[in-house]
């Protein structure tokens, strides 16, 4: 309402790609995304929800993918990312907590061996008032 641009940076888009693949990647991702949707939160739809709200106010929306690309050189960050991910999975779906913990141990081993790469999807959104002619 005040006519100034708004920048939303590091908006998670819900995607995470880990290499090498692991049999429980989809299970962990699904439970994590469900956790992010709890209590009516937009979760992985945060980017599209924010863009939709901006457009509903007549704002121009510019989006730019800004993924994080991580590997063994980012060890502490990757460890924290994966550990917190599994904690959210255990909270959301306690029945798969053991699978999540095994997945985490396998992933941390991949990281320690230098073979894990991680791409975390983020999108920066810029919402700007439309310029009026005249």
Image (tube, rainbow, N blue to C red):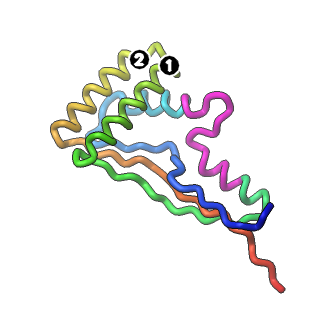
**How far apart are the alpha carbons under marks 1 and 2?**
7 Å
Using the image, determine if residue 119 lies above or below residue 94: below
Q: Residue pushed farthest left?
A: 113
Q: Secondary structure at mark 1?
A: loop
Image coordinates for residue 75, horizontal then vertical, percent: 26, 42
Name the image quarter holding residue 127: bottom right
Using the image, determine if residue 61 lies above or below residue 72: below
What residue appears at the point 23 percent right and 48 percent down from the top-left corner? 73
| Residue 97: in magenta span | no
Which label number is shown at residue 104? none
What residue appears at the point 52 percent right and 22 percent down from the top-left corner? 92
* Range of residues picked out in magenta: 35-52
Residue labelled with disc 2: 97
Badge 2 density bin: few <14, some 14–19, many ≥20, Cα 10 Å: some
**Most common SS among magenta residues:** helix
Image coordinates for residue 115, horizontal then vertical, percent: 20, 42
Name the image quarter holding residue 19: top left
Q: Residue pushed farthest bottom?
A: 134
Q: Is the residue under label 2 in contact with that under label 1 (CB below 8 Å)?
A: yes
Which label number is shown at residue 93? 1
Using the image, determine if residue 69 lies above or below residue 5: above
Q: Is residue 41 left or right of residue 14?
A: right
Using the image, determine if residue 26 lies above or below residue 117: above
Image coordinates for residue 82, horizontal then vertical, percent: 36, 34
Marks counted in the figure total: 2
What residue appears at the point 23 percent right and 38 percent down from the top-left corner? 111
Image coordinates for residue 25, horizontal then vertical, percent: 37, 32
What residue appears at the point 58 percent right and 38 percent down from the top-left corner? 43
Specify the quadrant that holds the C terminus.
Answer: bottom right
Q: Secondary structure at mark 2?
A: helix
Badge 1 density bin: few <14, some 14–19, many ≥20, Cα 10 Å: some
Q: Residue pushed farthest right?
A: 134
């Amino acid at each position: 309402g005040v006519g100034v641009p708004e920048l939303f940076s590091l908006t998670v888009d819900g995607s995470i790609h880990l290499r090498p693949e692991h049999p429980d990647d989809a299970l962990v991702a699904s439970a994590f995304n469900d956790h992010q949707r709890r209590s009516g939160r937009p979760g992985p739809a945060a980017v599209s929800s924010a863009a939709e709200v901006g457009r509903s106010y007549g704002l121009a929306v510019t989006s730019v993918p800004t993924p994080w690309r991580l590997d063994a050189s980012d060890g502490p960050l990757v460890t924290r990312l994966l550990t917190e991910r599994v904690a959210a999975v255990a909270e959301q779906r306690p029945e798969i907590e053991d699978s999540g913990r095994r997945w985490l141990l396998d992933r941390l081993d991949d990281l320690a061996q230098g073979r894990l790469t991680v791409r975390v999807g983020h999108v920066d959104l810029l919402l700007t008032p439309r310029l009026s002619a005249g």
